[in-house]
Image (cartoon, coloured by chain):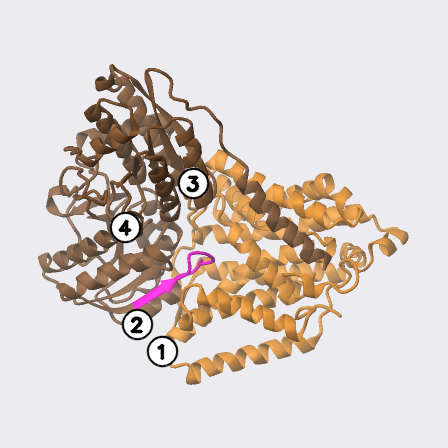
Chain colours: A brown, B orange
Amino acid sequence: MKKIASVMTALVVAGGLAACSGSDGGGSSESGTVTIGSIHPTSGALAGVGGLMDDGAKLAVDDINAAGGIKALDGAKLKLSSGDSQGKAEVGQSEAQRLIADGAVALVGTYQSDVTQNVAAVAERGRVPFVIDVAVDDKILQQGYKYAFRVQPDATSMGTSGAQSLAKIGQDSGTPITSVAYLHIEGAFGDSVFKAFEAEAAAQGITSVKEITYPATNFSDATTQVREAAAAKPDVIVATGYYPDGVLIAKAVSELKPDIQGLYGIANGAFDDGSFPAASGESGQNVLSANYHYDANDERVADIRTRFEAKYGKPMETASILSYQAVEVVAAGLEKSGSDDPEKLREAIAGISIDDPLLAFDGPITFDERGQNENATVIVMQVQGDNVEQVFPQEFSTKDLVFPATAAR
Amino acid sequence: MTSTTTQGEGPTRFVRVGRHPTTVVSVTVVLLLAAVFAVGGKDNGLVTQSIVTGLLLGGVYALVSIGLTLIFGVLGVVNFAQGSMLTMSMYVVYALVSGPGLPVYLATLLAIPVMFAFGMFVQHFLLNRLTSTGSHEGPLLVTLGLQLLIANVLLMIFSGRPKSVGTPFDGSFEMLGAIASYSRVIAFAGAVLVGIALTLVLRRTSLGLSIRAVAANAQGAALVGVNVRRVYALTFGIGAASVAVAGGLMTPFTSLTPSVGEQFTILAFVIVVLGGLGSVLGATIGGLVIGLVQTVGALYLPGTGSLILVFAVFVMVLFLRPQGLYGAK
């Protein structure tokens, strides 16, 4: 009995420790500066990407200040006040409250859908605009919030355009795709992308012959799942999930050598990540990934990425570019409204149009009545050699598509 | 989770290998697998694959749990830092591979003394005073703090971006119609070797005798001249060294992040309690069983369902045999 008591103590303490850390005060709105709050998971399991995103937002603020600040506000400087969500919804929520109380006129964040949902609720109550950089769940913007805006495509649009791109790739290469087996992570993210894909794929004449879910934790070998997918004899295996599971799936596919035309990720956290080619080696070659992505052909993006790497010593991934973009959206809103009043800023952002997005989108960043960026879409990337190249559609391509995309074996 | 194994006071049960549980376990496992083949309604190749994958995964679980069963069984320390120590040894191996460019398996050998020393240090300076007073909460809180410390120091040094380590034995081969990758087979062999080596040390050496004596009755061992604190420190060191082997052998097929090992902590506790506290054989068999249950179970209950099955087996075993498979009454 004593031991069970001690285990319970441990769990309680673990919860307690998590609850009381972070928060470094500061961030009050002084005259001549405008504070933007940034909430990302800079500690915990997602600290890698969370840190990149926070740095992306910092770089955006520095760039805007170096270019003369907010001109409509007499050159007022931006100040970024960072909060650490630790990857937990309740911590993100309290950080949002703190940042708003400290005078933030807008928030950007947060990478995770559940954290984003809580922060959006706080922003709505506090009447402070919240520009979502990364968070995929459709539900976030289905609450009728007025103060939440999302730059990236939502799950449904990613699943839908992922299916369209796949069908188009098959047709263009003269090897029509008629069936897929779909592997996805358990939970709202994987489910919603899969559902949207399945519906659109059916319309495109692609049957989803097998759906296989895998758990988000304690998943350290994908061989059985991939074999199960291959047993359905699909033309293509599609995968939606995060980084570690994506690497496992790519490795399992290359080991099992199923007779497929390619491995295709949709909203996959691994396949277009800069560290994926090295981590997967041979098995990653030619893997396709439909995802939102920075526009590699854009000179401004190239410049930002070069300076980011020089400053922070890490390559700037897409998530980080999105944080940069989110800060730019806020800055553009400040220029348009000519006021640092959060409610006026919201009005301005709602009607904004940013013509040169840093991401490979269909057009300018404009928000619909839900707050969703109307032109957000996915493009298709492919691992070729040590790099992730943009291969589809043509207008964004950096290299030619290789399809059927079987790995070099 | 651990309540069912505490009858009496202190960690008094140790390596007791009866033939009985092994036979029961293997017969049960074989019967269940045969049933899956016969009436499971799944493709035979797929079932074979899941069995091979499950056994190889079980090898990894066994490696992680062997270290824990010593620390838990002998010291009675609920080591919440087990997963973080696993992560730490992975990063030690990563540093040796990416820095001086050593091959991964040589780096693993070098990580063993590093982690052994780390384990000795932790027990000697952080835990000894607490364990010798018989406190359970104290060491537990220390290891919890240690877990946070390790994860955040690793985050500071290596950043949270996923890292990977290459292996000279990349690739896979076919075995009974199933695919197995070399690095996973090597990890499995490592688990078996560590299991055998530790069992021999415990049974045949005077150190092993002291460890068993301390586990059975620390006071009595001290009376006959065993340096209990030294045995404690050595045991924690050995536990950490087995984690080093686990971490090193796992790096070729794991994406390294500062919190990657933590998901193994809970499963390792399940395996240790399932196998019987302090039993190396129990941890090995327990690891294999859990690996099989998780992977074969995933054919029928995908997603989290397979983990539910793992805990169902755990509860069932504890219901039928509260002291664990190889624990003594």
**Viewer-side residue, A156 vs A148:** A148
Quarter in which the N terminus of chain B is drawn: bottom right
- Residue occupying image coordinates x 52% and y 50%: B261
- Looking at the image, is mark 1 or mark 3 nearer the viewer? 3
Q: Secondary structure at mark 2?
A: helix
Q: Which residue is mark 4?
A: A142
Q: Which residue is mark 3?
A: A93
A236 sits to left or right of A118 = left
**Viewer-side residue, B92 vs A356:** A356
Is B280 drawn above or below residue A389 in the view shown? below
Q: Which residue is mark 2?
A: A231
- Residue occupying image coordinates x 30% and y 72%: A231
Q: In the image, residue A221 lies at what x, y percent?
A: 43, 60
Which three-letter amino acid code belongs to the residue tagged 1? Answer: Asp
Q: Chain of mark 2?
A: A
Q: Are marks 4 and 3 in contact (CB under 8 Å)?
A: no
Q: In the image, residue A19 lies at what x, y percent?
A: 53, 41
User: Magenta part of the protein: which range?
Assistant: A211-222
| Gap in angstroms between the C-alphas marked 2 and 4 | 38 Å
Q: Secondary structure at mark 1?
A: loop
Q: Neighbour class for label 3 at 10 Å: few (<14), some, many (≥20)?
A: many
Q: Which residue is mark 1?
A: B43
Q: Chain of mark 4?
A: A
| Gap in angstroms between the C-alphas marked 4 and 3 | 19 Å
B319 sits to left or right of A361 = right
| Gap in angstroms between the C-alphas marked 1 and 3 | 48 Å
